């Protein structure tokens, strides 16, 4: 809770006038407890999981009926109906209500312990961006090892096989998993803010961006115009789709966001071999078509 009764008192304490965003934040949060603000995560997660994958639903329906967007579908032989996708959404929301929501409600003491602040001043862009980069790197590295554990025989058979029920991912399947996996993967997500504490707004932004990234990675589509194409070492949908396509036997492409861990530890060899093989097949097919065209013209 902001320890100032008025905007004037806050301005005096900061030694300057509040920015417009700080004024809005003061008006909204000054009378609300930190616990209440933290619980906004539940609303943000619900909105992200409900709305962000929605365009992918329309794209999938348009593709299956007219062939539109077919060139961008990574596994074009797989079609999902509206009922298939809605069922996935309901399963995820059930997990959200029974596991994620209650966890958010009881985990506030950890936020207090690491001292995530909610007062003034608000963080600047130059403060937020480095923190988000650090959070993504920490989450990616720790998630990599959790993911490798989930592909051990015990981890896969008991827990991770649920997530791999979708051999061709869809956006709503990003958080589709066993309840134990949902809980355990919360550790890598929380570890970054625990190491480098931030403002509550940065924390909200981190949670939202991490889930949006997971949805994009599980979209099942490789769009050339995606802005993530310009992020160094970013895996993306095509990279993670291979992991789902191979399934339970996959010992490749464990990283959640970037590709450097898989490269360093040699767990992208199967993926790189397949890509090289497909490129050779495409090149061979082009040469064959040119050769056949030359024969016909003769």
Image (cartoon, grey):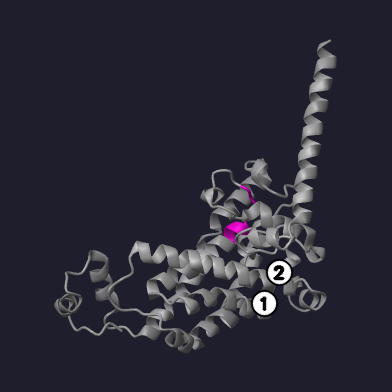
Q: Nearer the viewer, residue 279 or 131?
A: 131
Q: Main secondary structure of the magenta part?
A: loop
Tell me, for residue 227, which label it has, or none.
none
Residue 199: horizontal and vertical position, in percent?
Answer: 38, 75
Q: Residue at x 71, y 52 (%)?
A: 79
Q: Count neighbours of disc 2 (C-alpha within 10 A) and say few if under 14, some if 14 to 19, many if 20 or more.
A: some
Q: Which residues are magenta?
A: 215-222
Q: Between residues 65 and 116, which one lies in front from this camera angle?
A: 116
Residue 225 picture quarter: top right
Judging depth in this view, the residue of 92 and 10 nearest the camera is 10
Is 217 contained in the magenta span? yes
Eye-nearest disc, 1 or 2? 1
Query: Is any part of residue 133 visible from this angle?
Result: yes
Give the Cα distance between marks 1 and 2.
Answer: 9 Å
Q: Quadrant of the C terminus?
A: top right
Q: Is residue 68 magenta?
A: no
Q: Residue 64: percent from the left, percent from the top?
A: 68, 47
Q: Relative to 243, is 201 on the left or the right?
A: left
Residue 101, relative to residue 204: is it above or below? below
Q: Nearer the viewer, residue 219 or 188?
A: 188
**Image x and y of residue 194, in percent:** 49, 79
Mark 1 neighbour density, 10 Å: few (under 14) some (14–19) many (20 or more): some
Given contact means CB atoms under 8 Å apart, are the residues at marks 1 and 2 in contact? Answer: yes
Q: Which residue is mark 1?
A: 181
Q: Is residue 90 visible?
A: no
Q: Secondary structure at mark 2?
A: helix
Q: Which residue is mark 2?
A: 163
């Amino acid at each position: 809770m902001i320890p100032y009764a008025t905007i004037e008192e806050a301005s005096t304490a900061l030694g300057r006038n509040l920015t417009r965003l700080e004024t809005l934040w003061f008006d909204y949060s000054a009378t609300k407890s930190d616990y209440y603000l933290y619980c906004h995560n539940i609303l943000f997660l619900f909105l992200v999981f409900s709305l962000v994958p929605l365009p992918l639903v329309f794209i999938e329906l348009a593709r299956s009926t007219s062939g539109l967007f077919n060139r961008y579908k990574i596994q074009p032989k797989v079609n999902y109906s509206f009922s298939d996708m809605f069922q996935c959404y309901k399963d995820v929301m059930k997990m959200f209500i029974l596991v994620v929501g209650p966890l958010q409600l009881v985990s506030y003491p950890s936020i207090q312990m690491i001292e995530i602040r909610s007062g003034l001043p608000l963080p600047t862009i130059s403060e937020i961006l480095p923190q988000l980069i650090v959070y993504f790197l920490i989450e990616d590295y720790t998630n990599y090892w959790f993911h490798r554990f989930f592909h051990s025989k015990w981890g896969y058979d008991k827990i991770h096989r649920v997530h791999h029920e979708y051999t061709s991912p869809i956006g709503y399947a990003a958080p589709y998993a066993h309840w134990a996996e949902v809980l355990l993967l919360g550790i890598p997500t929380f570890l970054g803010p625990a190491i480098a504490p931030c403002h509550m707004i940065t924390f909200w932004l981190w949670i939202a961006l991490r889930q949006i990234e997971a949805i994009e990675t599980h979209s099942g589509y490789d769009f050339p115009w995606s802005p993530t194409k310009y992020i160094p070492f970013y895996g993306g949908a095509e990279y993670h789709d291979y992991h789902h396509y191979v399934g339970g036997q996959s010992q490749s492409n464990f990283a959640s966001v970037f590709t450097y861990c898989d490269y360093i530890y040699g767990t992208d060899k199967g993926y790189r071999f397949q890509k090289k093989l497909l490129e050779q097949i495409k090149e061979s097919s082009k040469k064959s078509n040119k050769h056949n065209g030359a024969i016909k013209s003769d």
